[in-house]
Amino acid sequence: MGDPLTLSLLLLLSLPLLANGVRLQEYLYFQVLSPGDIRYIFTATPAKDFGGVFSQRYDQIHLVPADPPEACGELHNGVFIQGQIALVERGGCSFLSKTRVIQENGGMAVIIADNASENDSIYVEMVQDNSGRTADIPALFLLGRDGYMIQRSLEQHGLPWAIISIPVNVSSIQTFELKQPPWTFW
C-alpha cells in the first residue's frame, strides 16, 4: 500500500485537483425589489473562466429581459439594456456569446437563466467557448425555476423589467430577514 508519508504527500498534492474536480461552488446573491410578489434574494453562480466581477454594488438597477430571450444576435431592446443588467435565457449559443452581445449593447452584467424552467437545484458551470474571445462584464448563471418565476411575474404585471440590488451580502442579513424563494431549497 505504501508508507504513510508517501500517501499523505499524494493526498496533499491531489487536494487542488479534488477542489477543481468537485469544486466548491461560489455563489453571488441578488435581491429583487420590484415587483413585490418576487421580492426574494436569489442565488447565482459566476462564470468560471470569463467575464468580469462586480466592483461595486448596484442598489436599484433594472434587470431587463433580453429580446430575443436567448440573446444570440441583434437585440430588439438593446437600448433598454444599456447601463442595466440583462436577463437572458440559456440555449442557442455559448454563454460567452450571450455575454458579449449584452456587453456590446452596453449592459453592466448578464444573468443567464437555465432554459429548463423546472430546474430548481442544478447549477451549470459556465465556461469559455474556446473561440479566443473575452468579455469584461460579469456573467452569472441562474436556476431555471428562478428565471421563469421572475419572467412570469414581469409578464403578469405587464412590466418591462424588474428592479434589483446586486450583489447582496447575505452574511450581513439576519437569518429571519432572508426572504428566499419558497420554491428553492437553500
Image (cartoon, rainbow, N blue to C red):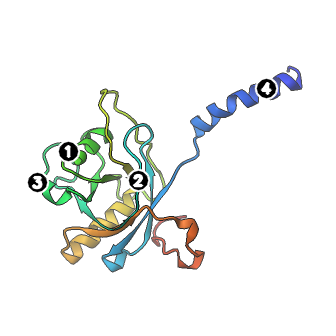
At x 53%, y 64%, the residue is: 185
Choose the circle earlier in sequence order: 2 or 4: 4
Q: Quadrant of the C terminus?
A: bottom right
Say if mark 2 contacts mark 3, CB within 8 Å.
no
Q: Mark 1 points at which residue?
A: 104
Q: Where is residue 169 in the image (x, y as percent from the top left)?
A: 51, 64
Q: Mark 3 points at which residue?
A: 76
* Distance from Cα at disc 1 to Cα at disc 2: 18 Å
Say if mark 1 contacts mark 4, CB within 8 Å.
no
Q: Where is residue 127 in the image (x, y as percent from the top left)?
A: 40, 37
Q: Residues within 10 Å of mark 3 (few under 14, many from 20)?
A: few
Q: Residues within 10 Å of mark 1 (few under 14, many from 20)?
A: few
Choose the circle earlier in sequence order: 3 or 1: 3
Choose the circle earlier in sequence order: 2 or 3: 2
At x 13%, y 57%, the residue is: 79
The mark lying in front, picked from 2 and 3, is 2
For badge 2, the amino acid type reads Phe
Q: Name the residue under label 2.
A: 54
Q: How crowded is mark 2: few (under 14 residues within 10 Å), some or many (20 or more)?
A: some
In screen coordinates, is 15 left or right of 45?
right
The mark lying in front, picked from 1 and 4, is 1
At x 39%, y 75%, the residue is: 39
* Distance from Cα at disc 4 to Cα at disc 3: 57 Å
Q: Residue furthest top?
A: 2
* Distance from Cα at disc 2 to Cα at disc 3: 26 Å
For badge 1, the amino acid type reads Glu
- Say the numbered circle drawn on residue 9: 4
Choose the circle earlier in sequence order: 1 or 2: 2
- Say the numbered circle drawn on residue 13: none
Q: Is mark 4 on a helix, strand or loop?
A: helix
The mark lying in front, picked from 2 and 4, is 2
